[in-house]
Image: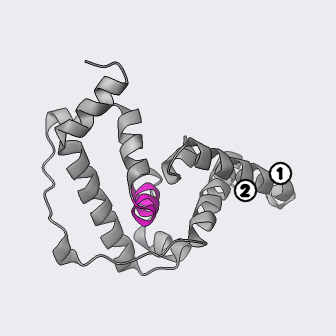
Amino acid sequence: MLSLKYCRNEAEAEDNLHNAFIEIFTSIAKYKNSGSFEGWMKRITINKAIDSFKKTLQLVPVKDDDIRDDATVTDDEMNLPADYILQLVQQLPDQYRLVFSLYELDDYSHKEIAEMLQISESTSKSNLHRAKAILKEKITNRHSYSNYSLSHGKQ
């Protein structure tokens, strides 16, 4: 599940996980038994995903005036299946997906994200804001959810 949050699809997530396990096995002697082993592996997995995106990714700041701030969420929007929400996150442009996953799903601060992605904190904030706006738009688009429901046998 961790790799899926940072990747566009299962194949990409499998590649990321494969690369992470290689790094984990080759670096296991570097683990100092301080902190949780699970946390150490999680950090390697996230870093591998970030590294793969850094090779091709251009993180571009978004002007705040280009973003509408409509934070109202209805009860229907709060009760969506987790796999549907993950599917929407995977559809985000790379830079937005990375920042959204790091901040919202793995509790990194904008300062930490900025350091990891080599961007400014304001770029991290604007990318998060834009990711949320895109997700909000997709969630409120009933046609999109109807297509998901039909393709997964939900009525």
Above or below — where is 141 with respect to 52? above
What residue is shown at x 52% (from left), y 79% (from top)? Answer: 118
Q: Which residue is mark 1?
A: 25
Q: Secondary structure at mark 1?
A: helix
Give how far across and how far down residue 138 sits, in percent. 25, 47
Magenta highlight on residue 101: yes
Kindly identify which numbered label has been placed on residue 38: none
| Amino acid tagged 1 | Phe
Give how far across and how far down residue 80 sits, in percent. 28, 33
Q: Secondary structure at mark 2?
A: loop
- Dot 2 or dot 1: first in sequence order is 1
Crowding near pointer 1: few (<14 within 10 Å), some, many (20+)? few
Q: How is the image coloured?
A: one colour
Query: Which sits in the foreground, 39 or 44?
Result: 44
Above or below — where is 147 with respect to 18? above
Give how far across and how far down residue 3 sits, in percent. 57, 48
Is 116 situated left or right of 26 in this image? Answer: left
Query: Which sits in the foreground, 17 or 31?
Result: 17
Q: Main secondary structure of the magenta part?
A: helix
Query: Which sits in the foreground, 116 or 35?
Result: 116
Q: Does the image show residue 80?
A: no
Q: Which residue is mark 2?
A: 34
What residue is shown at x 35% (from left), y 26% (from top)? Answer: 151
